[in-house]
Image (spheres, coloured by chain):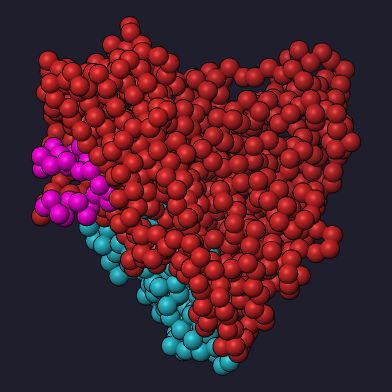
């Protein structure tokens, strides 16, 4: 939030009467943003007759009930709970008197309305606290005016202003007066030791709606006169439409229209089932105008790239080539991982209503601002005509960063000039991407006189840009150190997948470091600590992580996991999204195949806003990391994905999950990301535990296939 | 199109749909009961789990034509006030992340616990094996089921 720009828009901050959910006008059926009166989180205070809009973030009702807008898209990372908690802390209200509403895209009031990169809390930390503190100061000033006293005589607590002489007045009585005051620009933020809400576990604000089946998600959105669209896309990447026969489709009862746009065909129907049947009955002949790729050639391309460094290394400390040629021995290992679909459980969908005067979009999207500008460009409209309302998202994992489904919905609605809900079938989602790209890593480490001498990483990925993180661990700890990265091309659409790049880079690196430690006859944890501690006195070049924080989580995980005293333990640690994580996995073998039984996880994410939600993210990241490292495999033949639905693609199940114990490094540092950082180390921890159990190393994901072969 | 009378959550409905329409789309499109979710369409993920005469079933793969005279319960009808012991336990343990699969998880667990009120951990895992949670809330789901058993 920009306070300066907001104070320039005084007119915007007028009292607005929003009696009984009046904000929802136009969305009478949709409950996504409307408080559920049955929820136990809903406060004891009565519903107000009038709401006073005090800033873009906060409305206060005449009964003292507070509505806090949650600006960022909610994708399961629980920011719809944790971001308002931060505001409520500074506002000095009881959490039970707070109602949370999801804000739509509003560039005038909010900044960075994005769910991505585990950055919502980190970026919002100052602005959310400032938003709460600003309104608190305005309420204090309103009370000072009311009582004709100095504001220094007053304090705020639990939705009430208290005078030193014992008088009190509720926020509800002050709201209308506060709303007309000047907005202070320099407000004081609370000392963390005084926090009453931050650091206390708060339940998901949407939980009552979730467990009773309320229409919270994009796919649940309905509007009078709305039609459904299902789209037939080319069977393979690299194909275009040659001919189209829609006779059978049009004969299906309920199908209204068949509309071709580019190489896609939309089947429009009054009911979803009719549209799905219409899609199945559409006869399209495609012609290939580009290479039809396959997994065998992808792997060959990766291996070929990894055989040579690049001309321009990403980082080059000392002289690795010389160190390696002088070494007594070189450990040379290559790791490969496949393409992966994101598979959020709510299939892609979006609502669009394009008319002469406006473009209205509603749905699950991680990047509303980007989507607004792309839709405006696509339809030749001004961005100001395009509105986006955000719904709760049934998962994303990166898939909903890419608003191609919103663009499709907008284009279809523009063509048929009707409100339309576009829905992907699961098969559509598997077949259309974007996907996590396949990648490979080759590590070479020199060993001379029993010590590490030189470390060279070559990375390669498809459409990945930089496939490495050249300034992260072990950068800075090794004298002769080099990182190269190859960017390979593909016509298969690729994109960010939870913890982009590092979701596999970490597995590869942490497996290699474990093998290297074993080769050097060192304990894997001791070896990492030696590297880090030596770097404290003799850092090589610049690094993007803090040595002490990495050491801190390693030591915490070592202690909590009872490292070395239990069977089949594998260690892994990783820094990403500004957060430090160390994990110890334990496995048991049945018929040579492992079950991960326990993971001990140490996390340094700065101050923990909502421990309940934080532990959910940590557990989810670990389980996601283990599941995809073991089972995730999307393969291509003749330009198309071979796996088409969950009967052919294995996701982790309850019985395959370990017990997880979570340990936070106590900290009052600014909060950092949690949605992604526990995922990257998980695969390496499992691979290293598998080595302890079997003496065998894993180099190719999905590990389960390799384990079966090794077993 | 064929006319059907169906009973959902103790309420009778008259509908007119194609015979092959999956129950999932009848619930969502015809009756506006959208708590039952579309996940895969082939009975693999469990997001669409409902009860037919008390037994957990996958509504995405059950044509409307096959369920005459049967009683259907959806998440909206599991309890009057959203206070089924499993729903209470889900709240207590703050189970959901994205939340999309949770109605299906609860419906599977509710039917299972009716048949087996005191299951072992292994039996819980077996019963829940075919409900996917892409966010990985499995540990919380297991805890919530165990705490619902105790209550």
The residue under the point 49% across, 48% down is A495
The residue under the point 56% across, 72% down is A241
* Figure quadrant of residue A532: top left
Residue A505 shown left or right of residue A711 in the figure: right
Identify whether A199 is placed above or below A434.
above
The residue under the point 40% across, 27% down is A313
- The chain painted red is A
Nearest to the observer: residue A42 or residue A374: A374
Q: Colour of chain B?
A: cyan
Identify whether A548 is placed above or below B125.
above
Nearest to the observer: residue A679 or residue A203: A679
Identify whether A12 is placed above or below B1.
above
User: In x, y percent, where is residue A86?
Assistant: 60, 31
Q: Examine the structure image and report whether residue A464 is included in the region drawn in magenta.
A: no
Nearest to the observer: residue A225 or residue A258: A258
* Figure quadrant of residue A443: top left
* Figure quadrant of residue A488: top left
Bounds of the magenta segment: A684-711
**Residue A16 in sight:** yes
**Residue A662 in sight:** no
- Give the overall secondary structure of the magenta segment: helix
User: In x, y percent, where is residue A577?
Assistant: 46, 32
Residue A571 shown left or right of residue A309 in the figure: left
Q: Examine the structure image and report whether residue A703 is included in the region drawn in magenta.
A: yes
Residue A171 shown left or right of residue A473 in the figure: right
User: In x, y percent, where is residue A466?
Assistant: 45, 36
Q: Quadrant of the N terminus of chain A?
A: top right
Q: Residue furthest bottom?
A: B2
């Amino acid at each position: 939030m920009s306070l300066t720009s907001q104070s320039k828009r005084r007119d915007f901050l007028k009292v607005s009467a929003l009696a009984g959910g009046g904000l929802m006008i136009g969305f009478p059926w949709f409950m996504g943003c409307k408080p559920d009166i049955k929820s136990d989180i809903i406060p004891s205070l009565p519903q107000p007759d009038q709401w006073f809009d005090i800033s873009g973030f906060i409305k206060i009702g005449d009964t003292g009930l507070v509505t806090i807008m949650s600006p960022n898209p909610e994708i399961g990372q629980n920011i719809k709970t944790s971001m308002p908690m931060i505001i409520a802390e500074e506002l000095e209200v009881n959490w039970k008197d707070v109602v949370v509403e999801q804000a739509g895209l509003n560039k005038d009031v909010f900044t960075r309305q994005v769910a991505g990169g585990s950055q919502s809390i980190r970026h919002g930390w100052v602005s959310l606290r400032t938003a709460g503190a600003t309104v608190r100061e305005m309420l204090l000033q309103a009370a000072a005016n009311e009582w004709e006293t100095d504001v220094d005589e007053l304090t705020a607590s639990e939705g009430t202003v208290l005078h030193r002489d014992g008088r009190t007045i509720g926020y509800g009585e002050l709201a209308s007066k506060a709303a007309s005051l000047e907005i202070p620009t320099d407000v004081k933020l609370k000392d963390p030791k005084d926090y009453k809400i931050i650091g206390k576990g708060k339940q998901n604000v949407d939980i009552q709606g979730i467990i009773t089946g309320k229409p919270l998600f994009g796919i649940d959105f309905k509007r009078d006169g709305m039609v459904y669209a299902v789209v037939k896309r080319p069977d393979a990447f690299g194909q275009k439409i040659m001919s189209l026969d829609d006779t059978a489709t049009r004969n299906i009862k309920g199908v209204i229209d068949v509309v071709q746009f580019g190489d896609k065909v939309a089947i429009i129907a009054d009911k979803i089932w009719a549209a799905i049947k219409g899609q199945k009955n559409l006869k399209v002949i495609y012609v290939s105008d580009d290479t039809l790729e396959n997994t065998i050639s992808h792997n060959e391309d990766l291996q070929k790239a990894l055989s040579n460094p690049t001309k321009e290394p990403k980082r080059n400390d000392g002289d690795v080539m010389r160190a390696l040629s002088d070494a007594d021995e070189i450990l040379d290992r290559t790791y490969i991982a496949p393409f992966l679909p994101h598979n959020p459980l709510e299939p892609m969908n979006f609502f669009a209503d394009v008319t002469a005067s406006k473009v209205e979009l509603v749905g699950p999207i991680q990047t509303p601002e980007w989507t607004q500008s792309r839709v405006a460009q696509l339809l030749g409209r001004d961005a100001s005509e395009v509105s986006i309302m955000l719904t709760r998202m049934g998962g994303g994992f990166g898939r909903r960063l890419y608003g191609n489904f919103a663009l499709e919905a907008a284009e279809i609605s523009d063509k048929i000039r009707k409100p339309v809900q576009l829905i992907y079938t699961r098969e559509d989602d598997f077949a259309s991407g974007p996907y996590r790209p396949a990648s490979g890593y080759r590590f070479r480490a020199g060993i001379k006189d029993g010590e590490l001498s030189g470390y060279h990483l070559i990375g390669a990925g498809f459409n990945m840009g930089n496939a490495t993180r050249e300034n992260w661990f072990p950068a800075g700890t090794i004298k002769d150190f080099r990182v190269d990265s190859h960017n390979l091309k593909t016509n298969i659409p690729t994109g960010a997948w939870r913890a982009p790049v590092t979701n596999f880079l970490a597995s590869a690196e942490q497996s290699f470091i474990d093998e290297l430690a074993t080769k050097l006859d060192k304990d894997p944890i001791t070896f990492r600590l030696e590297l880090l501690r030596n770097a404290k006195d003799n850092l090589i070049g610049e690094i993007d992580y803090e040595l002490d924080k990495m050491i801190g989580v390693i030591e915490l995980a070592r202690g909590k996991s009872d490292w070395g005293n239990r069977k089949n333990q594998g260690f892994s640690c990783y820094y990403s999204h500004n957060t430090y994580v160390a994990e110890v996995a334990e496995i048991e073998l049945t018929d040579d195949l492992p079950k991960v039984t326990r993971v001990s996880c140490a996390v340094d994410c700065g101050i923990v806003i909502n421990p309940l939600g934080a532990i959910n993210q940590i557990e989810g990241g670990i389980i996601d990391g283990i599941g995809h490292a073991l089972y995730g495999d999307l393969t291509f033949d003749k330009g198309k994905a071979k796996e088409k639905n969950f009967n052919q693609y294995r996701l982790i199940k309850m019985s395959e999950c370990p017990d997880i114990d979570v340990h936070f490094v106590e900290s009052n540092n600014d909060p950092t990301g949690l949605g992604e950082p526990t995922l990257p180390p998980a695969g390496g921890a499992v691979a290293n535990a598998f080595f302890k159990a079997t003496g065998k190393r894993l180099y190719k994901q999905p590990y389960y296939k390799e384990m079966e072969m090794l077993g | 199109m064929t006319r059907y009378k169906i009973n959902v959550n103790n309420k009778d409905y008259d509908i007119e749909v194609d015979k092959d329409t999956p129950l999932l789309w009848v619930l969502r499109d015809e009756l506006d009961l959208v708590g039952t979710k579309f996940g895969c369409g082939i009975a693999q993920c469990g997001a669409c789990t409902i009860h037919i005469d008390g037994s957990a079933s996958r509504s995405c793969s059950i044509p409307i034509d096959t369920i005459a005279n049967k009683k259907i319960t959806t998440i909206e009808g599991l309890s009057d006030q959203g206070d089924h012991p499993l729903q209470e336990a889900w709240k207590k343990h703050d189970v959901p992340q994205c939340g999309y699969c949770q109605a299906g998880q609860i419906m599977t667990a509710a039917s299972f616990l009716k048949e087996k009120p005191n299951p072992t951990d292994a039996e819980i895992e077996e019963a829940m094996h075919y409900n996917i949670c892409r966010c990985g809330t499995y540990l919380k789901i297991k805890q919530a089921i165990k705490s619902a058993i105790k209550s």
